[in-house]
Image: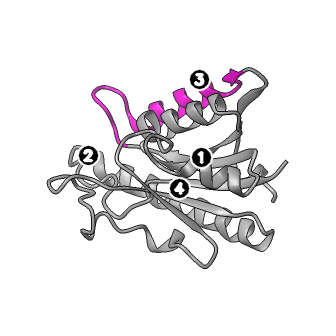
Amino acid sequence: MTSALLLIDLQNSILTGLGTPDRQPAIDAALEAVVARLAALKHSARAAGIPAFIVQHDGSPVHRLAKRGEGWQLRREIAPEAGDVVVHKTSCDSFFETDLEARLRARGVTHLFVGGCMTQFCVDTTVRRAVSLGFDVTLISDGHTTADMGRLSFEDIVSHHNMLLDGFDAGPHEIRIAASSEIAF
C-alpha cells in the first residue's frame, strides 16, 4: 500500500464570512485547530517520505476564493514544499476535471489520508469519489471542518459526516475514520 496525504481547500478565505457574527469566532477557531493538526501531519508525512497532494479551489472573480486573490492563497502552514503536488479544481469534487487521479496513479498511490475544508461539500464528495475510483481512504476525523449551514452547526456537520462516512465502501475499497493522533506514517 502506497499512501498520500490529500489536503483540500486550506485557503486563506475558505470560511471567511460564512458564519453569523456570534458564530464566526468559533468557526475561525476550529479552522485554526484543524490547520494546525493537518500541518503537523504534513510534516510527519514528509519525514516519512509520504507525498502531499494539496487541492486548491479556483473561485470565480466574485467568489471569496477568487483565483489569484489573497483569499485564494493556500494557508502558509500547509504551503507547498518541494515534491508536493498542487491540484486546482473548480467544483466540490477534487477529481472532477482535474489531473488528481492521474497524478496519484503515477505515484502508485492506493491509500489516501484526507483532511481539509467544507466537510459537507468538498471533503465528502472527494472521499466518496476516491473510494469509487478504487482508493482506500482514511478521513482524518479531527482534520476537516466547515461553517454552520442553516440550523446545523459546523460541529454537527463534522460529527455527522464522521459517523456517516466511516465504513462507506465501493467494492473492496472503503473510508475509515481516524483521529490525527492515531495516524503514524
- The residue that mark 4 highlights is 34
**Which residues make up the magenta segment?**
147-170
131 horizontally vs 69: left or right: right
Measured in 3D between alpha carbons, the distance from the residue under mark 1 to the one under mark 3, in whole angstroms, is 24 Å
- The residue that mark 3 highlights is 164
Q: Look at the image and say whether residue 148 sits in the magenta stretch.
A: yes
Measured in 3D between alpha carbons, the distance from the residue under mark 2 to the one under mark 1, in whole angstroms, is 30 Å
Q: Position of residue 14 (x, y in %)?
A: 34, 54
Question: What residue lies at 59% left-to-right and 59% top-to-bottom?
Answer: 53
Measured in 3D between alpha carbons, the distance from the residue under mark 2 to the one under mark 3, in whole angstroms, is 24 Å
Answer with the quarter of the image where residue 162 lies.
top right
76 horizontally vs 85: left or right: left
Please tell me whether mark 2 or mark 1 is closer to you in this view. 1
Q: Is residue 3 visible?
A: yes
Circles 3 and 4: CB distance less than 8 Å?
Answer: no
- The residue that mark 1 highlights is 101
Q: Look at the image and say whether residue 135 sits in the magenta stretch.
A: no
Q: Earlier in the sequence, mark 4 or mark 1?
A: 4
Question: What residue lies at 68% left-to-right and 22% top-to-bottom?
Answer: 170
